[in-house]
Amino acid sequence: MSTCIFCRIAAGEIPATILHQDDEVVAFSDLTPQAPFHALVIPKRHVSTLNDLASADDALVGRLVRVGATLAQERGYGVRGYRTVFNCNADAGQSVFHVHLHVLAGRSLTWPPG
Ligand code: DGP
């Protein structure tokens, strides 16, 4: 059994509110939402950080972004706007070491981020 919490969510071993699932990608609600809508979009395959992506993963990364954009648009945030974020390693605050795209929407988000 994997020790990676997001691998376990992708495998259905840990419950999560699943928002999208296909052969390569799973999206689910963040456990500690930072906005009215806060989804995480992950590859089913374990990849620890953005640093571990290869050129062969370019289409997979595109898929993560497109799934995230579609989820936000389906909920009516396309025009109003939303934020997509990949955190990588300590300075960015990455706490789960399985690549994930945050999709945040439903409130005005400040810039620059903290
Ligand atoms: P990051 O800090 O970028 O690594 O974001 C990790 C996110 O994962 C954080 O917003 C909280 C979320 N998270 C952590 N554990 C779980 C979990 O077991 N279930 C769900 N749904 N989200 C989780």
Image (cartoon, helix red, strand yellow):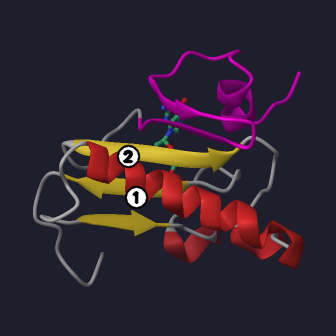
Question: Is 24 colored magenta in this rendering?
Answer: yes
Residue 109's x, y, as percent? 17, 68
In this picture, residue 111 sits left or right of residue 16? left
- The segment highlighted magenta reads 1-30
In this picture, residue 90 sits left or right of residue 43? left
Q: Residues within 10 Å of mark 2 (few under 14, many from 20)?
A: many
Residue 28's x, y, as percent? 48, 34
> Helix, strand, or loop for circle 2?
helix
Question: Is 6 colored magenta in this rendering?
Answer: yes
Residue 69's x, y, as percent? 40, 58
The residue that mark 2 highlights is 71
Residue at point 18% right, 48% down?
Answer: 76
Residue at point 68% right, 33% down?
Answer: 5
* Residue 69: numbered disc: 1
Q: Does residue 94 show up?
A: no
Front residue (pair 17, 80): 80
Real-space Cα separation, disc 1 to disc 2, in angstroms: 6 Å
